[in-house]
Image: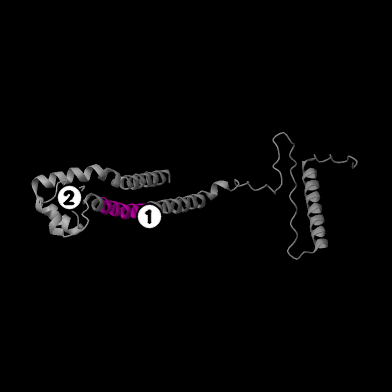
Amino acid sequence: MQVVGLGGMLLAIFELLLVLTVAQAPIRAQSGLRNAWMRVYNTNKLSLQRVEHLFGCCGFRDATDMPSHSSCSKSLNLSVINGCHEYLTHAVYHQSSVTARWATLAVLVQVMSLIAGSYLIAREFEVATAWLDEPDDVPPSNTGPPEPSASAPQVLAMPSIPAAPNGNAAQNDVHVAHDDTAVAEAMLVAVSDTQPSAPEGAPPA
């Protein structure tokens, strides 16, 4: 964006200098026209004669100042003979003023284009960098149970006894009691087998 703005400013400055240069053309023409008239007077007087007939003038300042031929004032058949300097200066000024107007219009168009371009570029830059103004993403809060620490004692839960498929709790109790009775009887048989038998005639214990 800065490069585009700098280029537009340099172009506008160049066009402004062009306007000032064109505006000063009539001032420089005062001396330049006389030098040009003198050069043509010494090389091609026929060209001066065409200019004199075009503007109805004779000579540069007057009829005695470098006329195209000696009978210039008589051939024009005019009551008042003016030099061609005034007409040439007016023609140069008119051409310079037209050029200056077009150059001024070009400068205005360039400045307006520069302002509009800078606005559009700034707007696009603002849209492209809008995400920089947004707040940073906040991590989601942990809503689950806290994790146990290493120093805290852990309590192991006893596994629950699954219910019977039929879901009858009373029958479960009967099966548990029956299993306990069978285990007790088996233990008694094992103990009795390990005890030595009493001798004959001994009273029973």
Residue type at the position of mark 2: Ala
Q: Position of residue 123 (x, y in %)?
A: 50, 52
Q: Which mark is residue 105?
A: 1
- Secondary structure at numbered mark 1: helix
For image coordinates 31% across by 53% down, the residue present is 99
The answer to if 96 sits in the magenta stretch is yes
Q: Which residues are drawn in magenta?
A: 89-104
Q: Position of residue 89 (x, y in %)?
A: 26, 50
Q: Nearer the viewer, residue 44 or 72?
A: 72
Q: Quadrant of the C terminus?
A: top right
Circle 2 packing at 10 Å, graded few (<14), some (14-19), many (20+), is: many
Single out the residue that lies furthest toward the bottom: 166
Left/right of residue 7 with respect to residue 158 in the rendered view: left
Q: Position of residue 43 (x, y in %)?
A: 8, 46
Proximity of marks 2 and 1: CB atoms separated by less than 8 Å: no
Give the color scheme: rainbow, by chain, secondary structure or one colour: one colour
- Cα distance, mark 2 to mark 1? 41 Å
Left/right of residue 149 with respect to residue 9 in the rendered view: right
- In this picture, is 147 found above or below 179? above
Question: Disc 2 marks which residue?
Answer: 63
- Secondary structure at numbered mark 2: loop
Residue type at the position of mark 1: Leu
